[in-house]
Image (cartoon, grey):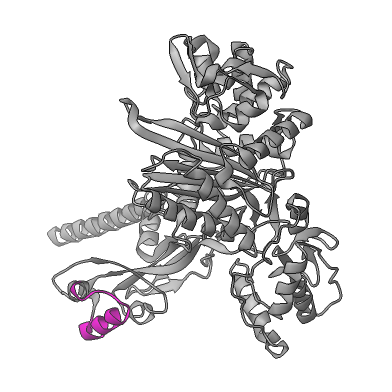
């Protein structure tokens, strides 16, 4: 009886144990199933999101200004390394510094993040070793380390833009990251998941700027030389196409910043006498004055509301034309009294002062323009001579562009196009008019006044023997933060139109606190002339030389275009296959390439004509099509579009040097 009882107890215990196992298994499998499945996935799977290649930033001709290259970041778990000598040699070949190699092979360390980023090919041997973990990263490279880099901006460690256009256009440039799953076997080795293979995502779009590389280099070199030679604390240069608002060059330099900066967009200044033409435009627009009207200039000295105004050129009276030509403070102050406060304010506000221009650059300054309720008794006169108002160099250049183009204030264009990685254009900026600032006739009258200013006025140092030039000087005292105007500190500026009657350029130059002579006529105007003469000598400086002939002075002789530049050697026809390979390689990476097929002929074509018609190349072989485009003075970028198609389309008139996207697809 006792034996039977013991057997029953054992059976009951076994049954209870079985029930407990089943209950536990049911609880784990049903109640906690998702938790344990997720834990298993974390142990054996790793979600990856490969960073998409960041789109390049290109200049107007398609040359890269900022590109990305693929690198890898290495990390080592020393406890997993079997052969430390092999790892040491592999890391040394990859370019890792010796102290970090010693740390990576130290068995007492658990994990080492190597600070060096290396090329994938250099890291291949190390990446094959168990215990070395590889993470793909991208590095942004500015191919032009000068002033353009301050405009294009920089990319942070996370791959996002942190300033400049890199930040302003980050959503366009960064693309869409990839996704996928990597499996790990029992030894921790990575295996691609058959159900969720990694995808590289979509690369970022390419951003094409309006910056002309030749002009940009000219402006940067001339500005750096002038700042050094004149002992200035800094300076700015802006070059615009006044007909469509395209920004062709932006150069800035500051000693305190250690070099280049984007101060053409971010640092307002009091413009001085360069403001006078817009007061004149307001007077002419309201029919309050005619160019030949005379005003008493009191021999160059006048006190208004307790403020004494003086002139450099002292005369008893002047016409409005002479007030602009000789930059008379007394004269413009006398004329400006005919404007009501509202009329004077609107004349300057409508010129774009006091409002940002809208370029896609974070931190662009709006400048300052006080509205009439906040004016003092001296404000109307101060505004007329360019004080109590602050403008950026870009704002002032755009306002003068309205004088150059017949009276239209334009939105500035810095981004010309945005292209997909396959070369297709998804955005192309069109000319946009903000408002009509003045009539065509008033703009013509102002241009004639500015031509006289250069020919026999305050800006004679900017004159050229070969072409008619228009422009206006401005010299204004500099303010010190929190301390008012500095003693003997000035901003010297000049805004020029070239050529004078049908301008293709608006060039603003400004020098901050030059030593010695601080007058703009002796500092900024000569800098303008240096830039302009260099642009005329350059081959690809966005000048229509056929139009220039109308503004050439009689009997003037002008050097042939590009005579000061060296010409690349010709590529023989037998080398065409190599040329096409070069174009394909550059086009595949989203870059354009300039490959001079029969280069002397291309240069001769460019010197003879500045605009060409894009030919119809449908049905042509690729080799013949490339030859035809280069012979026309055009540059080539291959795309995946149908064979023989072009962008711009056949029949479009373009300037020589334009990049034509030629289809090489099926």
At horizontal 48% and vertical 60% (from top left) the residue drawn is 51
Q: Is residue 454 positioned above or below 116 on the image? A: above
When the figure is inspected, residue 102 is found, relative to residue 350, above or below; the finding is below
On the image, the x and y values in percent for residue 186 come to: 33, 74
SS majority, magenta: helix
Q: Quadrant of the C terminus?
A: bottom right
Is residue 615 rendered to the left or right of residue 480?
right
Q: Does residue 247 appear in this view?
A: yes
Whole-percent x and y of residue 601?
74, 77
- Whether residue 633 is visible: no
Residue 455 on image: x %, y %: 64, 42
Q: Where residue 572 sits in the image (x, y, percent)?
A: 69, 88
The residue stretch that appears in magenta: 82-99
Q: Report if residue 214 lies within the magenta region.
A: no
Q: Is residue 347 left or right of residue 301?
A: right
Residue at (79% x, 80% y) in the render: 624
* Image side of residue 599 versus residue 54, left or right: right
Q: Is residue 658 left or right of residue 19?
A: right
Q: For the point 53% across and 66% down, which residue is it? A: 195
Q: Nearer the viewer, residue 346 or 520?
A: 520
Residue 135 found in image quarter? bottom left
Q: Quadrant of residue 158?
A: bottom left
Q: 114 and 456: which one is in front?
A: 456
Relative to 512, residue 23 above or below:
below
Q: In this orientation, which residue lies closer to the viewer: 171 or 359?
A: 359
- How many badges with numbers are in the image? 0
Q: Extreme bottom residue here?
A: 574
**Quadrant, the N terminus:** bottom left
């Amino acid at each position: 009886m006792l034996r039977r009882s013991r057997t029953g107890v054992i059976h009951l215990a076994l049954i209870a144990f079985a029930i407990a196992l089943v209950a536990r298994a049911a609880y784990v499998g049903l109640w906690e199933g998702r938790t344990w499945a997720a834990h298993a996935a974390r142990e054996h799977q790793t979600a990856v999101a490969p960073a998409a290649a960041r789109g390049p930033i290109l200049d107007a001709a398609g040359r890269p200004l900022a590109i990305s290259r693929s690198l890898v970041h290495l990390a080592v778990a020393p406890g997993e390394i079997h052969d430390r000598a092999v790892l040491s040699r592999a890391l040394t070949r990859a370019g890792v510094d010796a102290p970090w190699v010693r740390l990576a092979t130290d068995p007492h360390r658990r994990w080492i993040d190597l600070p060096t980023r290396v090329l994938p090919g250099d890291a291949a041997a190390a990446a094959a070793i168990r215990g070395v973990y590889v993470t793909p990263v991208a590095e942004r490279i500015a191919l032009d380390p000068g002033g353009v880099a301050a405009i294009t901006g920089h990319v942070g460690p996370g791959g996002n833009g942190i300033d400049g256009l890199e930040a302003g256009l980050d959503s366009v440039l960064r693309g869409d990251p990839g996704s996928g799953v990597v499996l790990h076997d029992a030894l921790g080795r990575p295996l691609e998941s058959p159900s969720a293979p990694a995808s590289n995502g979509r690369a970022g779009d390419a951003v094409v700027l309006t910056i002309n590389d030749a002009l940009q280099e000219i402006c940067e070199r001339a500005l750096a030389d002038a700042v050094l030679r004149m002992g200035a604390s800094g300076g700015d240069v802006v070059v615009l196409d006044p007909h469509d608002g395209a920004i062709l060059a932006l150069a800035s330099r500051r000693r305190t910043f250690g070099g280049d900066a984007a101060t053409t967009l971010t640092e307002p200044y009091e413009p001085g006498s360069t403001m006078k033409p817009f007061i004149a435009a307001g007077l002419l627009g309201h029919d309050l004055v005619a160019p030949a009207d005379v005003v008493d200039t009191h021999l160059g000295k006048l006190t208004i509301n307790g403020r004494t105004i003086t002139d450099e050129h002292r005369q008893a009276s002047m016409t409005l034309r002479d007030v602009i030509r000789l930059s008379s403070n007394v004269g413009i102050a006398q004329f400006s009294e005919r404007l009501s406060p509202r009329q004077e304010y609107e004349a300057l506000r409508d010129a774009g002062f006091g409002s940002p221009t809208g370029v896609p650059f974070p931190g662009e300054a709006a400048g300052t323009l006080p509205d009439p309720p906040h004016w003092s008794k001296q404000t109307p006169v101060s505004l007329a001579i360019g004080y109590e108002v602050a403008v950026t160099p870009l704002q002032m250049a755009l306002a003068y562009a309205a004088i150059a183009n017949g009276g239209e204030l334009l939105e500035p264009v810095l981004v010309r196009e945005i292209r997909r990685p396959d070369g297709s254009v998804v955005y192309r900026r069109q000319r946009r008019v903000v408002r009509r600032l003045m009539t065509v006739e008033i703009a013509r009258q102002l241009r004639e006044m500015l031509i006289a200013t250069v020919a026999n006025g305050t800006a004679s140092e900017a004159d050229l023997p070969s072409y008619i030039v228009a422009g206006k000087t401005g010299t204004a005292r500099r303010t010190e933060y929190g301390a008012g105007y500095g003693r003997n500190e000035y901003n010297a500026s000049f805004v020029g139109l070239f050529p004078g009657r049908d301008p293709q350029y608006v060039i603003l130059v400004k020098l901050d606190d030059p030593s010695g002579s601080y007058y703009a006529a002796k500092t900024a105007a000569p800098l303008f002339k240096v830039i302009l003469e260099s642009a005329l000598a350059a081959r690809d400086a966005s000048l229509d030389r056929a139009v220039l002939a109308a503004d050439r002075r009689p009997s003037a002789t002008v050097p042939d275009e590009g005579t000061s530049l060296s010409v690349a050697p010709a590529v023989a026809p037998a080398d065409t296959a190599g040329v096409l390979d070069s174009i394909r390689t550059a086009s595949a990476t989203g870059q354009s390439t300039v490959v001079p097929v029969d280069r002397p002929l291309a240069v001769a074509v460019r010197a003879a004509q500045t605009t060409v018609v894009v030919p119809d190349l449908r049905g042509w072989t690729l080799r013949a099509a490339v030859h035809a485009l280069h012979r026309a003075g055009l540059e080539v970028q291959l795309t995946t579009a149908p064979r023989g198609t072009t962008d711009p389309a056949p029949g479009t008139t373009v300037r020589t040097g334009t990049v034509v996207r030629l289809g090489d697809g099926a």
